[in-house]
Image (cartoon, coloured by chain):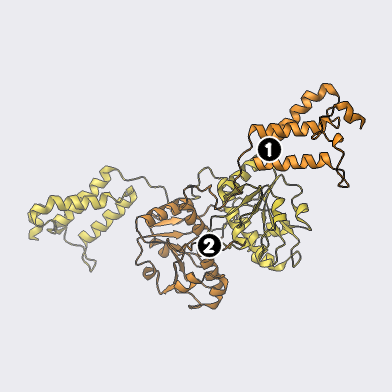
Chain colours: A orange, B yellow
Amino acid sequence: MAGTNSERIMLAEGPAIILMEPQLGENIGMVARAMANFGLAELRLVNPRDGWPSEKARAAAAKADHVIDGTVVFDTLEEAIADLNFVYATTARQRDGFKPVRSPVTAAETLRTKFRSGEKTGILFGREKSGLSNEDVALADEIVTFPVNPAFASLNIAQAVLLMSYEWMKSGMEDVHAVPFDAPEQPPATKDELIGLFDHLEEALEARNYFHPAHKKPKMIENLRAVFSRRAFTGPEIHVVRGVISSLDRFTRAGQRLPAAMTGSEAQATDDDKRDA
Amino acid sequence: MAGTNSERIMLAEGPAIILMEPQLGENIGMVARAMANFGLAELRLVNPRDGWPSEKARAAAAKADHVIDGTVVFDTLEEAIADLNFVYATTARQRDGFKPVRSPVTAAETLRTKFRSGEKTGILFGREKSGLSNEDVALADEIVTFPVNPAFASLNIAQAVLLMSYEWMKSGMEDVHAVPFDAPEQPPATKDELIGLFDHLEEALEARNYFHPAHKKPKMIENLRAVFSRRAFTGPEIHVVRGVISSLDRFTRAGQRLPAAMTGSEAQATDDDKRDA
């Protein structure tokens, strides 16, 4: 989806993403892109199979060059996390042992809290095929796991990084229901505007003998008003709807203006006048 | 990451995913996989460039065959959404017009509510390069947009589908902090267990004249207890820690058992006895 604007703020802070023995450069690149999408920038690789740098990674990163350029390679996981205070291990499988298991939401909130207090943190992701070993997990503080379809639980590495990066971004928002932009600001319609719409519509319909037979008119008006009340129109929307009514009311299909005497919105003709017309 | 278990429940319900004129089979396959990960199954394609079925899509779907097999192709967006009651359009760009803009969390909650009341819903995703046109968006009820890094906002189609599918899954959870499995249940330690640890440790250290000089002993014990109190040990963890202390206390580096008289945990010797040993 389009929408990148290079003049906007480039977010580049938060936990390090640590990939354990990644195999495919494409995956590393997709990880870098996902990180950049959600404001992370620090990528660490433990013993990547095909070496580093990787042109395939750069191509797949889709211009997340700041992440690719800053990527650091380590021989061992111990070295990769040496300077960090707190590390999450991601895993889809239950592990024996003493590590607490957290949801992505909880993990992101914890990482955000630690980030704000100046701690250095990381999120560790396993090998494409075999994930993290128990020895890898033992070096982490806590485990994070994703709420997945039980029968189809296998996430690829870039998807797993995307979800954690997304939750990281959300953890920095005051309200997860907030949106970065909204429809143009429109005041809700006042009752006066709404009643103006009712009057306009009902007059135009009355002029066409819509309310027939006469004894059903009160119920028909009630129904009509219910339909239009439920829509929660804004002021500008009321304006659009009244334009539609005026157009139907005043013009023929050929685009010719009806004589003023035929249009109730301009002439206060009686029902009988119009029915005869 | 590993973790799929084909004997577990296969979730396959919820909103349809509609892709507008997708180009690459690989992307369609990655979309199918992301849907399967989070329990969605109904994929609709509007006018896919390279036709359908697609072997590239099937390969990239990583065994999400139930999604690939059920995919339906339409000539127009109007046909693709004809049977639905409510449709979200995903976009990263602000649009003119009257559509409300929602966050993924809000959108997923809305979709879940409508699903539970029996409405058929869909989420519409744009072309790889150009996204959705204003005409496409006009056919949707509301807009959903992602909270992204302002300077790096371009999500690929499979990533966008992954995030919406993930939020769909979360919207069905009573508590987004819940996890599908947890570390083996462990009761938190009782104070009795904790004090047993203190006694054990302090006795073993006392036997080595750790608390020296004597006037600092109260402060040293206070610090030691603070360090071990802060850990919030479980009962089984206390057991592990006491095993460590016993091992250090009772055995030499060569693995030889120290004489019982030298180990405070077995012999209730006085401090003087041990200091002389």
The amino acid marked with disc number 1 is: Arg
Residue B117 rendering spot, x and y as whole percentages:
66, 38
Question: In the image, which disc is placed on residue A37?
Answer: 2
Q: CA distance from mark 2 to mark 1?
A: 36 Å
Q: Residue at x 68, y 57 (%)?
A: B67
Left or right: B197 as drawn, with respect to B50: left
Residue A170 rendering spot, x and y as whole percentages:
49, 53
Relative to B242, say whether A275 is above or below.
Answer: above
Relative to A121, say whether B100 is above or below.
Answer: above
Q: Chain of mark 2?
A: A
- Between residue B47 and residue A87, name the one nearer to us: B47
Badge 1 is on which residue? Answer: A231
Q: Is residue A23 visible?
A: yes
Label whose residue precedes the other's in the sequence (2 or 1):
2
Left or right: A220 as drawn, with respect to A114: right
Q: Residue at x 43, y 73 (%)?
A: A72
Residue that protrudes farthest toward the top in the picture: A215
Quarter of the image containing the N terminus of chain A? bottom right
Quarter of the image containing the C terminus of chain A? top right
- Crowd tier of the residue under label 1, counting other residues whose Cα lies within 10 Å: few below 14, some 14–19, many 20 or above: few
Left or right: B93 as drawn, with respect to B55: left
Q: Nearer the observer, disc 2 or disc 1?
A: 1
- Between residue A65 and residue B241, name the one nearer to us: A65
Q: Residue at x 56, y 60 (%)?
A: A154
Residue B174 rendering spot, x and y as whole percentages:
53, 42
Residue B86 rendering spot, x and y as whole percentages:
69, 45
Question: In the image, which disc is placed on residue B4?
Answer: none
The amino acid marked with disc number 2 is: Asn
- Between residue A176 and residue A190, name the one nearer to us: A190
Whether tag 2 and tag 1 are in contact, CB under 8 A, the answer is no
